[in-house]
Image (cartoon, rainbow, N blue to C red):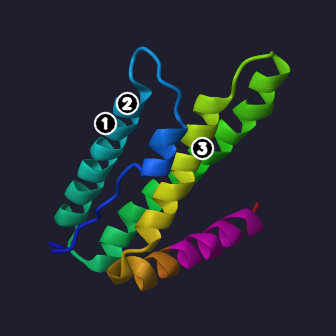
Amino acid sequence: MVDEHVEIGVPQQILESLPDSEGDPAQDMKRAVAGMESQLNRAIEAADSEAEAASHVVDALERLEEHLERYDEFVPELRAWGQSPIYAIAWRNLQADLVLQIHEHEWLADHVDRERNHRIVEDGIRFGNR
């Protein structure tokens, strides 16, 4: 059981970049981030070691990076269709900022680096055996 936890949030500059509109996208972002933070902290708390906790965090980082790429791909597509990409840009920027916020937790840094390196080696071995 790991006693550490992760704190993340929606940066004010991202909230300020959103246009005022119905449905309050700022609240959607805040709820999404709060849910992610809660899910991450439950996984960390349930982990038997910091290395296991780091594995859960790396999973979250990889999801954030995938989402970042997806939102980034939406921007030119929306522009090509004559639509405003402001929400895609805001969500893309949020994903990038959350990655940075998670990396700022010093207790995780070495474990996350080790887990990522382990996954790279594991993938390389798996792909090399095809």
Residue at image x 80%, y 25%?
A: 79
Over which residues does the magenta segment extend?
A: 116-128
Tell me the kind of residue under disc 1.
Arg
CA–CA distance in space, label 2 to label 1:
5 Å
Q: Secondary structure at mark 1?
A: helix
Task: Say above or below: 106 vs 18.
Answer: below
**Residue 92, numbered label:** 3
Q: Is residue 5 left or right of residue 116?
A: left
Relative image position of residue 10 (x, y in whole percent): 40, 49
Q: Residues within 10 Å of mark 3 (few under 14, many from 20)?
A: many
Residue at image x 33%, y 47%?
A: 36
124 drawn magenta = yes
Tell me the kind of residue under disc 3.
Arg
Task: Say above or below: 60 vs 23.
Answer: below
Tell me the kind of residue under disc 2.
Asp
Residue at image x 43%, y 81%?
A: 109
Mark nearer the N terminus (3 vs 1): 1
The residue that label 1 is drawn on is 31
Residue at image x 45%, y 57%?
A: 59
Mark 3 and 2 residues: CB-CB less than 8 Å, in contact?
A: no
Task: Say above or below: 61 vs 121.
Answer: above
The residue that label 2 is drawn on is 28
CA–CA distance in space, label 3 to label 2:
14 Å
Relative image position of residue 119 (x, y in whole percent): 56, 70
Mark 3 and 1 residues: CB-CB less than 8 Å, in contact?
A: no
Mark 2 and 1 residues: CB-CB less than 8 Å, in contact?
A: yes
Relative image position of residue 17 (x, y in whole percent): 55, 39
Relative image position of residue 22 (x, y in whole percent): 42, 14
**Dominant secondary structure of the residues highlighted in magenta in the image:** helix
Q: Residue furthest bottom?
A: 110
